[in-house]
Amino acid sequence: MMIALLRSSAAANPTPPDSTPHDPDGADRAPAGENPWLDQQQQPILSLTSQPEPKHHKLVASLTLAGLYAGFIGWTYLAWYRRPSHEFRWADPKKDGSWRIWTEEGWFGKNGYAGGADKMGHLWATLGLARWGTEMLNQWGGYDRLTSAIVGTGLSELLFFGVELRDGTSYSFSKGDFAFNTIGAAMAFTMSMWPAFDDAIDFRVEYAPSKAYRDRFSKNGDLDVAEDYSGQTYHLAFHLGSIDRLSRWKYGSWSRFVDLTAGFETRGYKPDPLIKPDTQMCLDGVVEKCDFEKERNLFIGITLNAQGLFDWALRGRSKAGRKITHGVFEMFSIPYTTLRIGEHSAVPSGEIPDEQ
């Protein structure tokens, strides 16, 4: 009893916080203000058994992150840049769209070349790479939180800025893509440095390869899975478990598994058909179907919080497994686990610009 009393009174912050994280039965959480993303169990001031300090691997973490970036750059070449380059050019407004995002040809316009899914993809990719880089440097490398967030976020933003510059000599530079890269980087930095924001919000992609992409991959080995927008659905998810009153309620334990979501997806815009006849062939009736039917969908609903589910299921069983699943399901949603409550669809009213 004396040991228990001393342990409780000797802690640096003996007063319990007013709120608990949205996954109290999941990953062990660090103190307020430190990393909420994965578990970082604080060592008690008094302990019956001594435990070694965690080992840090600054060099290995830095080299691994460099390898991750090198692999991504290699993939972009194979997927996008094997075509001949040309002089640098800015994007054609018909393809890049207007910053007036919801007009017909805006960044999310129904007449845009991807209906806005490309902008969501840029935000998600920059966010994800920044978050993974930050956690790798901080948790594995042992760098302090702010340094890790600055480097991880800065490298991701710099990489995708380089992608846009390279696009300028292979396709065209997109101001809209660059804008959403930057939004993704800012969101990643905020999630890394402000635990309450990270506890409440995720931006995830739900992906199942579309038939159009499967056909392209089987016929010509197409590696451009990033442009399989017809198989992607994006979720801005709010964790119900982050509502303190609900999570503390004796009947509220279910909230750790359920998110509210605002979703966005496009179908039929990309990938293109393997054979895309010209307009005259379509008008002359030479082919029966000239292109895929296109639509852009917005919806709200409830969806599975797989991050909370695996945090709960793996608690006390596999620390490494809990770390991996916590990170993976911050960025990915399991397909077919969303109940849509309200939905709005739109179809294009004009000719859709192609990539070329």
Image (cartoon, grey):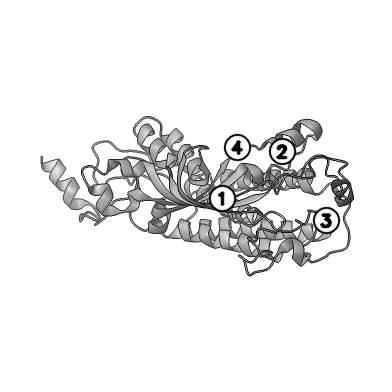
Per the model, the C-alpha gap separating discs 3 and 1 is 25 Å
Q: Sequence-wise, which precedes: disc 4 or disc 3?
A: 3
Q: Nearer the viewer, residue 355 or 316?
A: 355
Q: CA distance from mark 2 to mark 3?
A: 23 Å
- Whether residue 28 appears in this view of the structure is no
Amino acid at circle 1: Gly
Residue that mark 4 sits on: 208
Question: Which secondary structure, mark 1?
Answer: helix
In the image: residue 53, left or right of residue 153: left
Separation of disc 4 and disc 3 at Cα? 28 Å
Q: Is residue 282 above or below residue 170?
A: above
| Eye-nearest disc, 3 or 1 | 3
In-image side of 166 versus 22 (left or right): right
Indicate which disc residue 212 carries: 2
Using the rendered view, name the quadrant where residue 168 is placed: bottom right
Amino acid type, callout 2 = Ala
Q: Which residue is mark 1?
A: 128
Residue at (62, 66) in percent of width and height: 101
